[in-house]
Amino acid sequence: MKTAFNRLFLLLCILLPLTLSAKPKTLEQQALETMKTATQYMMDVVGYRGGFVWNYLPDLSRQWGEMEAKRTMVWTQDPGTPQMGQLLLDAYHATGDEYYYEAAKRVAQALIWGQLECGGWNYTFDFAGEASLKDWYATVGQSGWRLEEFQHYYGNATFDDSCTTQCAKFLLRIYAEKYDPSFRQALDKAIGFVLNSQYPVGGWPQRWPLMYDHPFQGRADYTSFITLNDDVIPDCIDFLVQCYQTLGTPGLREPIYRAMYLCILLQQGAPYAGWADQYTVSDLKPAHARSYEPRAISSSRTASMVRSLMQYYRLTGDTRFLAGIPAALDFLESLKLPASEEQRWGRPSGDPDALLMPRFIDPDTGIPQYVHRVGSNWYNGHYFTNQDITGTIGHYSSASRINVKALRRQYEELKAQPVEEVVKGSPLLEKELVPLPKYYAATRAFRGDVKSIIDALTPEGYWLSPLGSTSNPYKAGAPTTPSDETQYASTNVGDEYDTSPYRSMDGTMCISTRDYINKMVALIRFIDKDAE
């Protein structure tokens, strides 16, 4: 007994100093471990062969991109697979851990698998194959009332929602990281897609190769129109500029300048001196798109194009990019709605200087076009426009709030600067190659309490967040008789046959790709202050 006690005492004497000398982990060490654990779970459990959608139930029984997706499907829209790849490269830059680079390679390989032969990408692709994707389009996609872009399977690639350009930018960045030749062919295909799809006049269609096989409700297929909506032209320009500054390919300058100068031509004349979301190719006139996107001058697009033209001036120093801005700002100010209409609109603004104005303006008459709908689903409902600002659709705002005063101030400040100062650092004018930024996702101004983020990681290794939107599972047999039902006039979803997403109100928790990215951004910014 005494001998056993002596042995125990001796063991304690040996272990006690070791225990006392063990230091608790620093917050930075905890952050690094949390990042690694969360990323391993996302890559090994949540994602599918390196691809991602937006939200997942924790048991992976349901998942969603912009619409509900099959487990084998991958989404290219933000916050989808390209954004995951960019985040992983950011984590690699912040930590130096090769694991993150290897994870980013898996994401790139998934995107290369989903790259179409033409060189671009669709909103989604399916590792289960083309038949599975066509089945999704014929069921879930076709039944999404407010998501008409998914109601027809084209089989080509899209610039909409930056799908192709975000994938292409990620491939450019991962290639430039170590110049791994395994990525070069896919990158060259993506560059070729952007160049080959550009119209001689300088713009891009929404989808390419061109197809005209889906006239809708008596109107021409809009996907061949020159498109500004969702920044198609600015995004293509930005991608080509990044390629030029990184690869130095001389043949990229001409298509870049051609596209930028087209933006000047697309501005309409006074008194409606703004821009439309899309244009017919033959005459550069405003054109329609989806049934709730009428042929119109768009106030929100006009504001975004003012910002784009100021950026093109910074890139080139050419004052022609500034010439049309005063008329555009005057046009926006002329759209300010009276207090009576603002009261009827009934939605307050957080910016006291923002003017409320119609989103869509008839390009011939200047009359506002407010969008409404009747019916209960895609099969029996329809959209229409009138001049009544009340009762408009809820999923796509018919009015805009724009701070014209701030835009005018930015314009005046830019115009007052010496040109040499304005163009300093422009990748189009530098004689040397300009490296890509160190961080992409981590430049988002997302902040969170680091300790709380660490503590929120589940024992399994993932973060939970409220499910922002859900959807009705696909159900066959929808009523097709035209309906004047108004119950769903301003909702995000119609009846049980509508597969459009709508706000989840039951407290369901999910694994969110966006939430993962945001929390990782906060940890990266904590670890490396250069990311701020």
Image: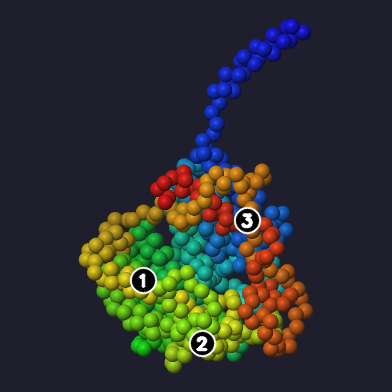
* Residue drawn at x 55%, y 61% as measured from the top left: 79
Q: Which mark is residue 417?
A: none
Which residue occupies the extreme bottom position in the image?
365
* Residue drawn at x 72%, y 54% as measured from the top left: 59
Image spot of residue 528 (x, y percent): 44, 45
| Residue bearing mark 2 | 369
Q: Quadrant of residue 419?
A: bottom left
Mark 2 is surrounded, within 10 Å at the Cα level, by few (under 14), some (14 to 19) or many (20 or more) other residues, namely many
Q: Is residue 242 visible?
A: yes
* Residue drawn at x 54%, y 23% as measured from the top left: 21
Precedes in sequence: disc 2 or disc 1: 2
| Residue bearing mark 1 | 406
Image spot of residue 254 (x, y percent): 33, 71
Which residue occupies the extreme top position in the image?
2
Compared across the picture, whether 468 is left or right of 481 comes to left
Compared across the picture, whether 175 is left or right of 261 comes to right
Mark 3 is surrounded, within 10 Å at the Cα level, by few (under 14), some (14 to 19) or many (20 or more) other residues, namely some
Q: Secondary structure at mark 2?
A: loop
Mark 1 is surrounded, within 10 Å at the Cα level, by few (under 14), some (14 to 19) or many (20 or more) other residues, namely few
Image spot of residue 95 (x, y percent): 48, 43
Q: Quadrant of residue 261?
A: bottom left
Tell me: residue 450, above or below residue 518.
Answer: above
- Marks 3 and 2, Cα distance to the nearest angstrom? 38 Å
As shown in the figure, which amino acid type bears the numbered disc 1?
Ala
Compared across the picture, whether 507 is left or right of 531 comes to right
Q: Nearer the viewer, mark 3 or mark 1?
A: 1
| Residue bearing mark 3 | 465
